Image (cartoon, grey):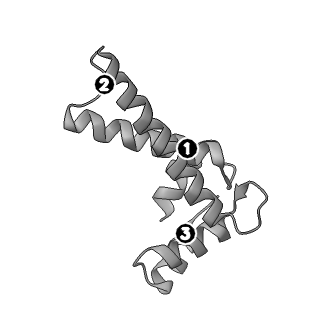
Amino acid sequence: IREEFRTIDRDNDGEITTDEVRKAFLRKKREMMRRSGSGRSGRSNQSDSFEEELLQCSRDADALFRKADTSGDGYLSKREFEVYMKRNTKHSDLAIREIFSMMDL
């Protein structure tokens, strides 16, 4: 969880913005496309498909952010991220507390 938070929190200010979540989703999508060998090849329909995939990726990131941003302030605090991870991952409470006690954000 700590590594994921730091990967998303690119400016290391201890909060995650909508743009940081979008960029994280897009980085992951590009990585997956590189691995599979797909992506742009210059043809129009493939370009449209690529753009639609990126748009969907952005929508998915926005949906995740809205769900996790319980305060509605446009930022994910460490606490909001922790609560979201508890509700949406299989990590135990103890494991999450230990990870966050080691964090220096």
Residue 101 placed where, x, y %?
58, 74
Q: Is residue 80 above or below residue 75?
A: below
Residue 24 placed where, x, y %?
49, 45
Residue behind mark 3: 102
Mark 2 vs mark 3: in front: 2
Q: Residue at x 49, y 38 (%)?
A: 55
Residue behind mark 2: 46
Q: Residue at x 20, y 38 (%)?
A: 36
**Foreground: 7 or 32?**
32
Q: Is residue 3 above or below residue 48?
A: below
Q: Residue at x 57, y 57 (%)?
A: 63
Measured Cα–Cα span from mark 2 to mark 3: 45 Å
Measured Cα–Cα span from mark 3 to mark 1: 26 Å
Q: Is residue 68 above or below residue 20?
A: below
Q: Residue at x 29, y 15 (%)?
A: 43
Mark 2 vs mark 1: in front: 2
Determine which of the numbered discs, if any, sits on residue 22 in the image. 1
**Foreground: 69 or 12?**
69
User: Helix, strand or loop at disc 1?
Assistant: helix
The C terminus, quarter of image: bottom right
